Image: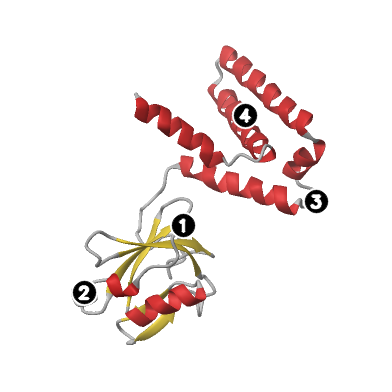
Amino acid sequence: MKLQINIEELDWKKVDGMMPAIVQDYMSRQVLMLGYMSRDALEKTLQTGKITFFSRTRKSLWTKGETSGNFLGLKSIFIDCDKDTLLVLADPIGPTCHMGTVSCFEGDTIPATSFLNELAALIHDRNITRPKDSYTTSLFESGKSRVAQKVGEEGVELALAHMEGEKEHIVNEAADLIYHSIVLLEHAGIPFEDVCQTLKNRHTKK
């Protein structure tokens, strides 16, 4: 993740001092909003870790969430090839839009598959915090053999469901297998992203 950028390399004159900043959820990559950053707003964003814009109506800096509590935590920031637009990856706390929606762009949805990143992050958090009354916690504390056994069991159950041919049953068993597989990866200290990268690499080589 890139947090430090050279503010001086940006083409401030080209945008009259107001740099467009496209904000995306750092996990789902859903576009959350578009704002404008002055040099001061960008500096404050980098200093505080909370995304700050310049309000063209109020003519002043405003940190997203300062009144609602729905902050946008800075995860990384990138400059486009023309050095006149920013791509900001954020960790949203609550809905981004003042209308109470996740995104300011009405009707924008993200593929359900993007939830896998969130699931992997949640499982990682469970491994670290080990909250009581959590099934995921109980798996981690049951040990390597039990974690491996559950993946084997779920794999067999998915195969049997496929033989039966009932689609909802297949979907449920596949979900169980994917969940337990991510738990196994976490238990083994392997990021889920590594598996996705391997699949991507295999596809690229063809």
Which mark is first along the chain, 3 or 2? 2
Residue under the image location 49 percent in, 74 percent down: 65
Residue indicated by mark 4: 177
Q: Position of residue 179 (x, y in %)?
A: 62, 36
Which mark is first along the chain, 4 or 2? 2
What's the distance in space between the residues labelled 3 and 4, CA to CA? 23 Å
> Which disc is residue 1 wearing?
1
Residue indicated by mark 3: 132
Camera-side mark, 2 or 3: 2
Residue 45 versus residue 166 in the image, above or below: below
What's the distance in space between the residues labelled 2 and 3, CA to CA? 52 Å
Camera-side mark, 3 or 1: 1
Type of amino acid under label 4: Leu
Residue at the left extreme?
14
Which mark is first along the chain, 1 or 3? 1
**Viewer-proximal residue among 85 and 112:** 85
**Viewer-proximal residue among 40 and 9:** 9
